[in-house]
Image (cartoon, grey):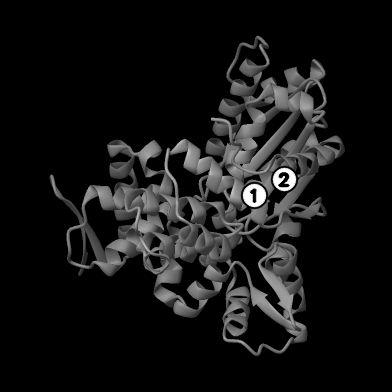
Amino acid sequence: MTEPPIHPHSFRKMVEGWISFLPYREMGFFMMPPKTGVERRILQFIEDKKLHIIFGLKKRTICIHLDLYEEPKIEKYRLFSELQSQLKRGVKREDISFEGNDLIVLMSTLRENGFDIALFVTGADRMIQNLDFTLFKELVSLNERFDNLSILVFTGVYLLEKRTKSKLFEKNPLAANFFYIPLYSIEDSTQFIKYLEEKWNMHINRKQKEWILKNCSGRLGWIKNAMRLIRERSKITPGEIAEDVSMIDRAQTMVQVFSQEIRKLLEAISQGGYQTQDKDTLYLEYLTKLGLLKKEKGEYIIYPPYLSTIVKKHKQEDEINLNYHLVLSDQEYRVFTHLQKNLNTIVGRDVIAERIWESDVEEKYSEWAIDQLLHRVRTKLIAMKSPYALRTKKGMGFVLLQK
């Protein structure tokens, strides 16, 4: 592979933003468009020591990534267990010897030996949406106890909304560091297409490329999904790409992260002729900083255009489904809604796998993971006293029934 996933200049600017925050040894919140996939860039940086040197990372700094996988809730013991596991990996990368299984002892030992810890946290959006900041309280406690710890939280949720901000500050009085990460640029999108063409040994035609860059620019996950569709059907038209269920599902997942206020604002803008209102000022500023809104000829335009298409098509999510969205993880919710759309119909494991892993299905496919996820969905539906029942059809797939 010779092509990097995104333009080197963009990657440098992104990482330099992270590194410039580390000397403060505090907790910082990096707000970005929902479902940006920043996890890949974080791992790219953490696992390549050459990049640490290139970007001037302070020596004796251990970088670790904590992905919470959009779980609705994480208990303290699980948080500490995962932190300990990731920190041990970081210690191993630095060739440091350590014996023991206690997180606090390990962090104390690193501090005594002059090591800083940079903790990158992703996958907490669901907890933030549920206004459950218990996890952040635990992280703040660690941050206050260890003056060698920096915590960078990446989220697709707008943290400065009144109800979210008040809860966040209640649990985290230090929450004053807010940063914005905008959409990837069109140069990054063009670069990503080249990267996938080389990786997958394929080539897309001019019309397909023009449609992707015009409608999906900045959303690498959408681009990857569209490229996978083209790989499977080289003559697929732009219209067919736009209407493919996997594209719609991926875009809907992004929209569902937004609060109702932001979704209503996007709906109003998507209809055209929107008149600015005082109550929308903060939201407009937020969406503009993320690159999701642009102003052309005095009017706000949703960007990229495919997002506007999805907002128009799917104006208001059903309140019942909104409740499911708050209880189920993203992957679980995608599977549930697909089964719901195909009520009383057996859905094969391959289709379920595509809903779980989307464009990464080839790399991540696991029969065990499918069974575990469906088991969690079934358990949560029962706990919610849902009118739906999930059944397994041996050798065939799964079916959702209405009681």
41, 347: nearer the viewer: 41
Q: Quadrant of residue 400?
A: bottom left
Amino acid carrying mark 1 in the image: Asp
Residue 315's place in the image compared with 127, above or below, is: below
Q: Are marks 1 and 2 in contact (CB under 8 Å)?
A: yes
Query: Disc 1 marks which residue?
Result: 188
**Which comes sooner in the sequence, label 1 or label 2?**
2
Give the residue type that dot 2 points to. Ser
Could you tell me which residue is drawn at 65 percent across and 18 percent down?
91
Instruction: Work out how far the residue at label 1 is from the one at label 2, CA to CA, in angstroms.
Output: 7 Å
Question: Could you tell me which residue is drawn at 68 percent across and 55 percent down?
Answer: 185
Using a 10 Å C-alpha cutoff, classify the residue at mark 2 as few (fewer than 14 neighbours), some (14 to 19) or many (20 or more).
some
Q: Position of residue 79 (x, y in %)?
A: 57, 38
Label annotation for residue 10: 2
User: Which one is in front, 194 or 340?
Assistant: 194
Q: Position of residue 177 (x, y in %)?
A: 81, 52
Q: Name the element at disc 1.
A: helix
- Indicate the quadrant containing the N terminus: top left, top right, bottom left or bottom right: top right
